Image: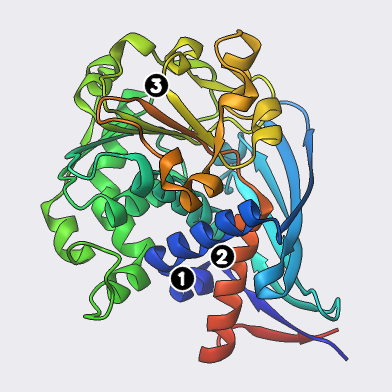
Amino acid sequence: MTQVTMLSASQISHLLDMPAVIDAVADAYKEKANHPATLWPMVYEQLGGEADMDIRSGVLASKHVFGNKLLAWFGENAKRGLPELNGLVNLYNSDTGEPVAVLNATALTGFRTGAAGAVASRLLANPDATTLLVVGTGSQAPYQIMAQLCVLPKVTQVLLANPRDAKKAQAAAAQMPMTLEKLFSQTIRATNSATNSVVAGLINHRLSEVEFTGVTDLPAAVQRSRVIVTATPSTKPLIQADGVQPGTHLNAIGADMEGKQELEAKLFQGAQAYTDDVPQASEVGEIQNPIKAGVIKPEQVVEIGNSLLDPTLGRHDANAITIFDSTGIALQDLAAANLAFVRAKEQGIGTQVDL
């Protein structure tokens, strides 16, 4: 009989702290670059209207696990009083093939996607940046903010923009301190530890110093910011090339299917471009657009795992514009899921089901 650990969204939030997830995702990227990890082709389907689903799967050899994540997005669910994102992560022992855990995919996706952007910012962004702009006020926004605060110790101003509704940006900004404290109690506890060296400054102390502002003028906010995160379902560019200042780092999170776009294609001209998986991103990520426009070629894009292993592939100079196209790969999910599962076993958390 096989025993499987079931973990809910609240249990995952209790088990995970963002600095640990950032390190786990960075290790997964490096493992991909070293080739012991395996990715299988992503399955993506539109389900009509504002709805889609995708399945991502792979093997994380170093942790002796493989698995898959099915995540469904229903954009109209907010009107029904339901979450827009739903899904599950299934984790298996790669030595025996036995299932070991089933995890809520919404919370896990939030952590691992936030962590992905933080891995890139830690490597590429100016560590002295003081202003962070997050475009998009959906479920991913607080995860992106917390992750960026964990790796950018001098950020004191967080600007929030909602291209469709400026009032939503202002409301999100007003609620953000409470949202972060609610979602990341474990991160706050972990970063209070004297042994934790990932975060420069205690997160709970930093949250009291950071000012959150909802902006109505996106182009002006772009000009003010040296780190920009876009996390929207946009199909046309929100960030224009002319407004991005030298030395800015951008994390493009939203594009995960053909036709999506958050950045003007010509922004990539002369910029240093990075992604998690070049073949996947060339088809469904942000870089699909400058590739189609002939601005860049796929071979000019560096996989983030390679740059983590080889410092010469990082930022070339202080004035360079750097862009990380985060399409999301299964290894991120497996790394975060395995971390949650291991901690759950150690702490006796989760529901045990005999199959």
Quadrant placement of the C terminus: bottom right
Disc 1, disc 2: CB below 8 Å? yes
Residue 336: give its label: 2
- Given the image, on which type of amino acid does mark 1 rest? Leu
Residue 194 visible to the viewer? yes
Sooner in the amino-acid sequence: mark 1 or mark 2: 1
Q: Which amino acid type corresponds to the residue marked 2 in the rendered image?
A: Ala
Specify whether 159 is left or right of 262: left
- Label 1 or label 2, whichever lies nearer to me, is 2
In the image, which disc is placed on residue 16?
A: 1
From this view, report whether residue 18 is shown above or below residue 195: above
Classify mark 2: helix, strand or loop.
helix
Disc ID at residue 163: 3
Nearer to the camera, 285 or 297: 297
Identify the residue at image location x=36%, y=40%.
Answer: 124
Find numbered disc 1 in the image and state the secondary structure of the residue it sits on: loop
